[in-house]
Every structure is written in structure tokens, then in C-alpha cells.
Image: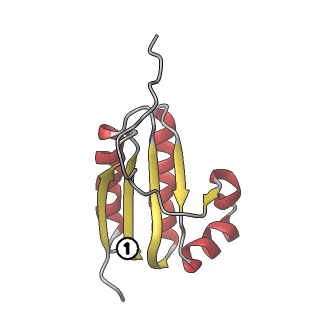
């Protein structure tokens, strides 16, 4: 079993990124749920992206944690994206139909390399 690592980062546009690595299972799911709660609390209008590129194994408890993330983000009115899912994560998300529901972005949600250049009108 690989050690799990879950952390947050933020892009310049306000998107909070949940980075999950290793195994997402009954042992690591409580940590993922705590990180999800932090992400929703910190997220701006840009929403939440979950980077699954480093996931080695995911079981039904891990999938349930991702469903919790989706439901929590949705209840808060935040966009939710799953990005760069590893082959094991992609396979399970497709088998469960969640890939179709959420869509899967091909690339990890990277931070912008420079400051924003366009202004968004307010109001």
C-alpha cells in the first residue's frame, strides 16, 4: 500500500486544487474529507479542482470521498472538476459513471505562470 498524501494549493484565478497521491482508501479517506472541507471553505467563485494524477489505488471509500467533494462543492455553488486522473482512478470513475457526470480534464490544474492580464468586470 502506498502512503497517501493530500494537500491543497490555489491558482491565481482562485481555484483551489486538491492534490491526491498514493492510495485513496479506508485509511486515507478521512484525511481527504478534511482537505475537501478546507477546500470548500477557501474556494473562490472559480471553484475546486481535484488532481488525481498521483493516485495509485482508489477503492469505494475513496470514491465516496470524491462524491462528498462534489456534493459539498455543488451545495456551496462552486464549480467542481476532476483533472489528470491516473489510469486506476480513470478506470474506476468510468466504471461508476462519475467520469461522465463530472467530466475528466486531461491535464493537471497547473498554477498560472504569470499574473492575470485580463480584467474581469465586476457588477
In front here: 57 or 16?
A: 16
In front here: 105 or 110?
A: 110
In the picture, residue 32 is in which quadrant? Answer: bottom left
Task: Quarter of the image for the N terminus: give it.
Answer: bottom left
Q: Residue 31 placed where, x, y %?
A: 29, 63
Q: Give the residue at x 62% y 67%.
A: 93
Q: Give the residue at x 44% y 46%.
A: 48
Q: Residue 92 placed where, x, y %?
A: 61, 73
Q: Give the residue at x 44% y 25%.
A: 119
In front here: 111 or 69?
A: 111
Above or below, comparing residue 22 to residue 8 in the picture: below
SS type, badge 1: strand
| Image colouring | secondary structure
Say which residue label 1 marks.
21
Would residue 112 be found to the left or right of residue 64 on screen? left
Would residue 39 be found to the left or right of residue 120 on screen? left
Above or below, comparing residue 67 to residue 15 in the picture: below
Q: Residue 12 placed where, x, y %?
A: 35, 42
Amino acid at each position: 500500500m502506498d502512503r497517501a498524501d493530500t494537500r491543497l494549493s490555489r491558482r491565481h484565478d482562485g481555484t483551489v486544487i486538491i492534490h491526491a497521491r498514493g492510495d485513496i482508501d479506508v485509511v486515507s479517506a478521512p484525511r481527504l474529507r478534511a482537505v475537501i472541507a478546507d477546500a470548500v471553505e477557501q474556494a473562490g467563485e472559480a471553484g475546486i479542482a481535484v488532481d488525481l494524477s498521483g493516485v495509485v489505488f482508489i477503492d469505494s471509500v475513496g470514491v465516496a470521498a470524491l462524491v462528498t467533494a462534489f456534493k459539498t462543492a455543488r451545495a456551496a455553488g462552486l464549480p467542481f472538476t476532476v483533472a489528470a486522473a491516473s489510469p486506476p482512478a480513470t478506470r474506476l470513475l468510468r466504471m461508476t459513471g462519475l467520469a461522465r457526470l463530472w467530466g475528466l480534464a486531461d491535464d493537471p490544474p497547473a498554477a498560472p505562470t504569470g499574473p492575470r492580464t485580463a480584467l474581469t468586470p465586476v457588477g
